[in-house]
């Protein structure tokens, strides 16, 4: 059996698109926004958990947007570009008014990014539990294995 990482290296496998029963891979949000002129906007938007290729797309987009070496960006500008790249890939079917304001209003941008990050955290159960009933258990465990060549064995 080939490991998942080897499969990704070999075939560019993007992972499973199976639905998670605790949180769906796609989730709709209702966004309400008041622009600087006082006009109210409202619309639904779909967040989709990123697969491997999409995560790589985020990095490529952010790098292209920067126009300079990433290390030369001020941290606030790097965060802004990463947020723009992330939501441009993660969000589907934004309302017509959304693009204008999310690219101009950083408070709005980071609020939308936060909703995307919460969706990601819930999907991958980053906050703890491995199941609906065991919310305190960690879903990942990595322990050191000893080998016969280890003098402590």
Image (cartoon, rainbow, N blue to C red):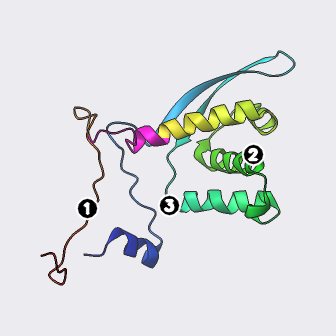
Write down the residue under mark 1: 143
Res 55 quadrant in image: bottom right
* The label number, if any, that marks residue 117 in the structure image: none
The residue sitting at the right extreme is 37
Q: Pick whichever, 72 or 150, lies toward us.
A: 150
Question: In what element is the residue under mark 2?
Answer: helix
Question: Label 1: how many residues lie within 10 Å, few (<14), some (14-19) or many (20+)?
Answer: few
What residue is at 56 percent from the left and 29 percent from the top?
29
> Is the stretch drawn in magenta largely helix, strand or loop?
loop
Q: Is residue 128 magenta?
A: yes
- Left or right: 85 with respect to 120? right
- Left or right: 122 with respect to 52? left
Where residue 124 sits: x, y (%)? Answer: 39, 45
- Left or right: 24 with respect to 45? left
- Spatial CA distance of label 2 from label 1 is 36 Å
Position of the N terminus, as image quadrant, is bottom left
Question: Label 3: how many residues lie within 10 Å, few (<14), some (14-19) or many (20+)?
Answer: few
- Mark 2 or mark 1, which has the lower sequence index? 2
Compared to 99, does 49 lie above or below?
below
- Spatial CA distance of label 2 from label 3 is 25 Å
Identify the magenta region.
120-130
* The label number, if any, that marks residue 52 in the structure image: 3
* The label number, if any, that marks residue 76 in the structure image: 2
The residue sitting at the bottom extreme is 149
Question: In what element is the residue under mark 1?
Answer: loop
């Amino acid at each position: 059996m080939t490991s998942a990482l080897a499969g990704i290296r070999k075939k560019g496998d993007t992972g499973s698109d199976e639905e998670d029963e605790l949180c769906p891979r796609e989730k709709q949000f209702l966004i309400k926004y008041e622009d600087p002129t006082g006009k109210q906007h409202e619309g639904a938007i779909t967040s989709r958990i990123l697969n491997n290729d999409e995560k790589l797309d985020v990095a490529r987009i952010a790098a292209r947007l920067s126009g300079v070496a990433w290390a030369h960006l001020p941290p606030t500008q790097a965060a802004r570009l990463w947020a723009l790249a992330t939501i441009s890939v993660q969000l589907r079917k934004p309302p017509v008014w959304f693009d204008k304001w999310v690219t101009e209003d950083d408070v709005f941008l980071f609020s939308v990014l936060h909703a995307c990050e919460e969706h990601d955290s819930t999907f991958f159960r980053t906050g703890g539990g491995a199941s609906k009933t065991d919310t305190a258990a960690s879903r990942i465990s990595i322990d050191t294995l000893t080998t016969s060549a280890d003098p402590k064995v």
